[in-house]
Amino acid sequence: MQQNNYEILITNDDGFEAEGLHKLKEAIEKIEGVHVTVVAPANEKSACGHSLTLHHPLKFTEIDDDFYKLADGTPSDCVYLSLSAIYGDEKKPDLVISGINKGSNMGEDITYSGTASAAMEAVLHDIPAIAISQVVDFSEPFVDYTLAAKTAKKLATKILQGNFPLPKREFLNVNVPSNVKEAPIKTTYAGYRYYVNDAHLHRNPRGEEYYWLGLHPLAFDVRKGKEHLLCDYDAITKGCISVTPVKLDMSAYESIEKLQEWL
């Protein structure tokens, strides 16, 4: 890698105090010739999707040198606003990294994910991006982000070296298995995720009803016609790091002719 000063913007959806964010920052700062800026939501914004804040103002608060929290902001806000308020018109980041998320982002969960959505916002502005998540067992009290941080550093270094193979408006969605010290990297596609409707009804002391949305079990299947490829969930169950190229073009091209005939 040339001895240039590369700018890397880091954000997440778990909030500015999240351990995964700080582990990521520590790892990326070790890359030679790199300057890191962190802009993260002031509060957890998990499953906020690719949302921007349009109905109230946003405020940066400087936590440390080149480390900011964005009050009431989403991960997409963090990227969007940083490009004008921090970087300006003269220079954009060379790379945006979102994470390390506590929990997986596989299959159609990518559409819910604030972690992935920050990467989406970056590639909309022609900036290479990585969304990285650590698969966890939520019954365990300790999460080890070591391998995820190491993986992020490796991928970031390769991107900065040039010859990044992805075209515009595509990003890397990375999931790292839990309870392993080392793991091979496998290229994958986003698996077919099964969902349930898990809403828990409760009542407060005044008798008023309220709901908590529950967690979906991790249940996946292969996509029809893609059996020769490895899906993200299969890679994780085999103890491998899943790296999925994700594109923002959601057009169902294979259905255009059928839809035209139907209409």
Image (cartoon, rainbow, N blue to C red):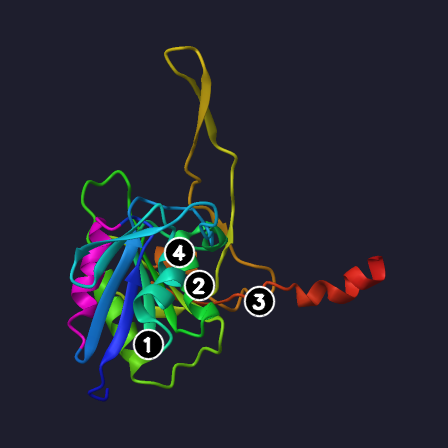
Find the distance from the CA under tag 4 to the CA under tag 3: 21 Å
> What residue is shown at x 16% (from left), y 62% (from top)?
65
> What residue is shown at x 33% (from left), y 49% (from top)?
103
> If you read the primary sequence from the N terminus, does the residue marked by circle 3 or circle 2 appear first?
2
Work out whether residue 58 can be spotted. yes
> What residue is shown at x 54% (from left), y 64% (from top)?
227
Query: Residue 121 — which label?
Result: 2
* Side of 96 where 165 appears, left or right: right
Residue type (three-letter) at the residue carrying disc 4: Asp
Horizontal and vertical percent position of residue 54: 48, 50
Provide the residue designation for mark 1.
Answer: 94
Find the distance from the CA under tag 1 to the CA under tag 2: 14 Å
Find the distance from the CA under tag 1 to the CA under tag 4: 18 Å
Provide the residue designation for mark 3.
Answer: 249
Is 110 inside the magenta-drawn segment? Answer: no
Is 26 inside the magenta-drawn segment? Answer: yes
